[in-house]
Image (tube, rainbow, N blue to C red):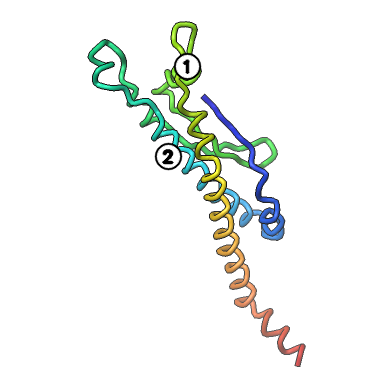
């Protein structure tokens, strides 16, 4: 099962990010995406069916595998960029049947509603992570600038 959504709420921070070297851009963007994915993963885990003792006693299967199998994977895109994909591992292949149903089983969605519920919190988490990442990386750049001695040379020229 693969669910994706695109966020375009970070235009201002992206402008600042473009001024950073590529490696630093990747760190900032990766940290922000991981933070958002973590929020969504936790909400999906909380919403995943776990199966009750009564259903197991009646011959039903336990769904604990789903809750334990929610994964976040970093995936390379064709253009040199990357994304994070949230899904279930192979051992919980039946999650798709529960989420979307079959002709014999009615759907009992848990992932899509969890994504909808956690979207705002994920965006906020991504924004916070991006802001912190930009601060951290710009401090590194400033430190490199001062270590290089360029700042001292500029001060001497102004005198």
Q: Tag on residue 42?
A: 2
- Quickly name the residue at label 1: 107
The percent position of residue 123, horizontal first and vertical second, equals 57, 46
Quadrant housing residue 140 = bottom right
Q: Nearer the viewer, residue 22 or 136?
A: 136
Q: Please give the name of the residue rendered at 46% of the width and 38% of the height, measured from the top-left corner.
A: 41
Mark 2 nearby-residue class (10 Å; few <14, some 14–19, many ≥20): some
The percent position of residue 110, horizontal first and vertical second, equals 45, 27
Q: Secondary structure at mark 1?
A: loop
* Left or right: residue 45 compared with residue 15: left
Q: Which comes sooner in the sequence, label 2 or label 1?
A: 2
Mark 1 nearby-residue class (10 Å; few <14, some 14–19, many ≥20): some
Which circle, 2 or 1, is nearer the viewer?
1
Q: Nearer the viewer, residue 83 or 119?
A: 119
Q: Please give the name of the residue rendered at 47% of the width and 21% of the height, measured from the top-left corner.
A: 99
Q: Nearer the viewer, residue 134 or 104?
A: 104
Q: Please give the name of the residue rendered at 50% of the width and 40% of the height, measured from the top-left corner.
A: 118
* Image quadrant containing the C terminus: bottom right
How far is the residue under mark 2 from the one under mark 1? 21 Å
């Amino acid at each position: 099962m693969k669910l994706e959504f695109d966020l375009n709420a970070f235009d201002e921070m992206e402008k600042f990010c473009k001024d950073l070297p590529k490696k630093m851009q990747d760190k900032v963007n990766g940290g922000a995406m991981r933070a958002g994915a973590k929020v969504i993963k936790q909400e999906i885990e909380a919403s995943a069916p776990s199966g009750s003792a009564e259903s197991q006693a009646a011959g039903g299967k336990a769904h604990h595998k789903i809750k334990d199998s929610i994964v976040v994977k970093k995936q390379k895109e064709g253009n040199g960029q990357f994304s994070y994909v949230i899904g279930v591992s192979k051992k919980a292949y039946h999650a798709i049947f529960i989420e979307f149903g079959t002709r014999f089983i009615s759907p009992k969605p848990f992932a899509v509603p969890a994504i909808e519920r956690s979207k705002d919190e994920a965006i906020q988490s991504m924004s916070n992570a991006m802001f912190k990442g930009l601060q951290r990386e710009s401090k590194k750049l400033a430190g490199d600038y001062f270590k290089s001695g360029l700042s001292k040379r500029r001060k001497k020229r102004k005198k």
